[in-house]
Image (spheres, rainbow, N blue to C red):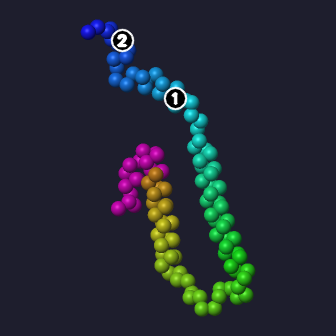
Amino acid sequence: MQSQTIDPAKAELNYHHQATAEAHHEEHPDFRLFGLVVFLIAEGMIFMGLFGAYLAFRSTVPVWPPEGTPELELLLPGVNTINLIASSFVIHNADTAIKRIMYGACKFGLP
């Protein structure tokens, strides 16, 4: 058998990935902003389609809302909306207290 000298630089685990990892990462363009724009455009198209369908349906019906349509319930959605808004104030106050390093104020109001 022939004896080979071992290069210490190549003896490290995954030596061939270390040299190209930074260069490989820098070669790729950053598509985060492009992804955000595509997402916003897609969401806008969905809502425009829904509003377009609503307007097209409403323009074909002579009386709006059509006869026989039950009245919408307002009590439960109203209570849920108030609960959602109140919880957002509590979370905002807790987030502000954490940013100001006031941990006691963060615990106030949270169960």
Query: Range of the magenta residues?
Result: 96-111
Please determine whether, in this image, residue 11 is positioned above or below residue 111. Answer: above
Q: Earlier in the sequence, mark 1 or mark 2?
A: 2
Residue 6 appears left or right of 84: left
Residue that appears at 64% across and 65% down: 47
Task: Return the residue at label 1.
Answer: 24
Please determine whether, in this image, residue 99 is positioned above or below residue 86. Answer: above
Answer with the quarter of the image where residue 111 lies.
Answer: bottom left
Residue that appears at 32% across and 8% down: 5
In this view of the protein, which residue sits in the foreground, 25 or 86? 25
- Mark 2 burial class by Cα count in 10 Å: few <14, some 14-19, many 20+: few
* Quadrant of the image containing the N terminus: top left
Measured from the top left, where is residue 4 in percent x and y?
31, 9
Task: Return the residue at label 2.
Answer: 7
Residue 27 appears left or right of 104: right
Residue 8, label in figure: none
| Magenta segment includes 102 | yes
